[in-house]
Each structure stands twice: as C-alpha cells, then as structure tokens.
Amino acid sequence: MHTRKRATPQQVTIVSANPETLDGLQSYLQSAGVAARGTRRLEDCSEMTAPFTVAIVLFPDDFSTECILRTVHEVGARGPSILRLLVTGHPKVFEVLAKECEQVVVVPRPVWGWAILDAIRAHVDDETPKLQRPNG
C-alpha cells in the first residue's frame, strides 16, 4: 500500500519582534522538516519573499497596524499564492484582511506551533493541484 507523504513547504518566513517567539517557532518548524527563516524587522519581510516561499507567519502585535497592512499587501503583490498567517492577540483588527483574501489567515493568540504547521501544510496541500495543472 502506497501512502501519500504530506507536502512540506519549500520555505516559510517568520516575522516577530520577540526573539523567543521567532527562535522557538523557527526551531519547531525546522524540526518538522520545514525550511524556515526569520527576521525581527518587518521591513525585511518583502525582501525575504522568494519564489519558493509558500508562507509568511507574521506576529503583528509588535508592529504598527498600518505597517502590517502594507506588508501583507506587498507580499500578496509579490506572490499572490503565499499564505500570510497573522498570529495576534487582537484578531478583530485584522479580520478585514482575511475577508479580502483567502490567502490571509488570522489566528488568535495563544497558539501552538503544531496549529501553525497544520495551517501551512493545509495551504500547501490546497495549492499542490493548482501547481500541477499544465495551464494553471
């Protein structure tokens, strides 16, 4: 019996001003086989978006709302299929983003690393058929 191996993202970028959050999630994702890299500077987020980036995990509570909104839109412009996962203690502030775009997911804090990993894997699994279509 052949079982399908769960798709693993090629790269995930993490943006958090908190070094413990950044290092902890990066280590967790890497231990799960996900190539993850992080930054504490929001302005680095767009530059860290490569063609093989499948998700960006943002912890927006440490940054201004305007900067987060701008960054989410910039990332979407560079890569419309990139999952933008916002992990926040104030989910209502960012709900409008999730309503505007299905590639934006708002997750209330606190959240476990496995929940973030599952959201990334679900996104990759959803995108896989689109990537395999010859004209899609």
Image (cartoon, rainbow, N blue to C red):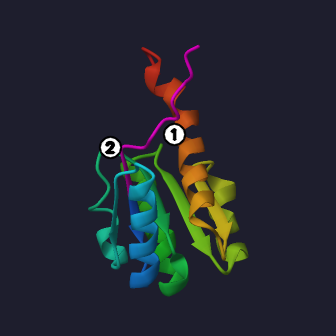
- The residue that appears at 45% across and 63% down in the rendered structure is 28
| Rendered location of residue 38, percent (x, y) | 34, 68
Tell me the residue that label 2 is attached to. 52
Q: Label 2 neighbourhood size at 10 Å, few (<14), some (14-19), many (20+)? A: few
Q: Label 1 neighbourhood size at 10 Å, few (<14), some (14-19), many (20+)? A: many
Instruction: Give the distance between the C-alpha atoms of the residues marked 2 and 1, in whole angstroms.
Output: 12 Å
| Rendered location of residue 45, percent (x, y) | 34, 66
Secondary structure beneath label 1 = helix
- The residue that appears at 49% across and 69% down in the rendered structure is 58
Secondary structure beneath label 2 = loop
Q: Are marks 2 and 1 in contact (CB under 8 Å)?
A: no
What secondary structure predominates along the stretch shown in magenta? Answer: loop
User: Is residue 86 depicted above or below 16 in this figure?
Assistant: above
The residues colored magenta run 1-12
- The residue that appears at 66% across and 66% down in the rendered structure is 107
Tell me the residue that label 1 is attached to. 124
Indicate yes or no whether the magenta region holds residue 10: yes
Q: Earlier in the sequence, mark 2 or mark 1?
A: 2
Apparent side of residue 88 relative to residue 55 in the rendered image (left or right): right
Q: Quadrant of the N terminus?
A: top right
| Rendered location of residue 74, percent (x, y) | 40, 60
- The residue that appears at 37% across and 75% down in the rendered structure is 42
**Residue type beneath disc 1:** Val
User: Is residue 34 depicted above or below 4 in this figure?
Assistant: below
**Residue type beneath disc 2:** Phe
75 and 8: which is toward the camera: 8
Residue closest to the far right: 92
| Rendered location of residue 114, percent (x, y) | 59, 59
Indicate yes or no whether the magenta region holds residue 7: yes
